[in-house]
Amino acid sequence: MDPVPILQKLLTDATNDLPAPPESAILSHGAPAVDIGVCSLLAVYLQSVTPHQLNSNPRITEGCAIVPQGRFAFQTWRCAPATMPPGADAITAASLASLTDALAIWDGMVFRRTYGTLLPDGPPAKSALVSLTPLGPAGGMAGWQLLLDIELSRPTTTS
């Protein structure tokens, strides 16, 4: 399964999930630079592709199904308070806005996984939400990262 159409759909869906569209929504080759002159950023990228053994028993090594598994990352960033020292109200407001973005993307991914609409077309693939982790502050911004694993092909058998 080609990860490029998956990336494009994930970016479109995540952008639509946000309460307000970001100033910049990008497909990135990796973790984005966050000091790009915008106050809200959404980046989606393929963090890694690894072989994934479908057999959960580690003692069985023959006839195990192996599939490539892609780990897709979403990063959503918002401006953090720039005044020094920032007041409690400013920190709280920025934190809540950032968390609201992250949870909107998380909820959208849960919905699409549940209803089989996560991928652009074809049969649904196995997927798992891995984590939702705070990021930053970096370059005057703070954000969240969501990791999502998706199997990228049908199983093949090893011998």
Image: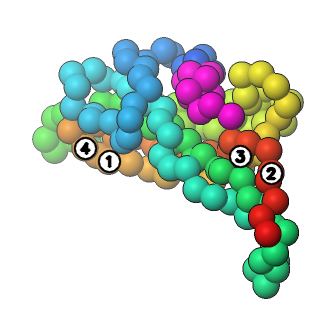
* Residue, disc 3: 151
Relative to the observer, which residue lies in front, 87 or 38?
38
Tag 1 and tag 4, C-beta contact below 8 Å:
yes
Is label 3 or label 4 in front? 3
Give the CA distance from mark 1 to mark 2.
Answer: 38 Å
Indicate the amino acid at tag 2: Pro
Return the mark for residue 138: 4
Quarter of the picture containing the C terminus is bottom right
Based on the picture, tell me whether residue 3 belongs to the magenta stretch. Answer: yes
Return the mark for residue 79: none
Which secondary structure class fits the magenta region best?
A: helix
Secondary element at tag 2: loop
Secondary element at tag 3: strand
Is label 4 or label 2 in front? 2
Indicate the amino acid at tag 1: Gly
Earlier along the polypeptide chain: callout 3 or callout 4? 4
| Left or right: residue 37 compared with residue 55 | left
Give the CA distance from mark 4 to mark 2.
Answer: 40 Å
* Residue, disc 2: 155
* Residue, disc 1: 136
Is label 1 or label 3 in front? 3
Earlier along the polypeptide chain: callout 1 or callout 3? 1
Q: Residue at (79%, 44%) from the top-left corner?
A: 154
Q: Residue at (74%, 30%) from the top-left corner?
A: 118
Give the CA distance from mark 2 to mark 3.
Answer: 9 Å
User: Magenta stretch?
Assistant: 1-11
x, y percent for residue 64:
81, 67
Indicate the amino acid at tag 3: Glu
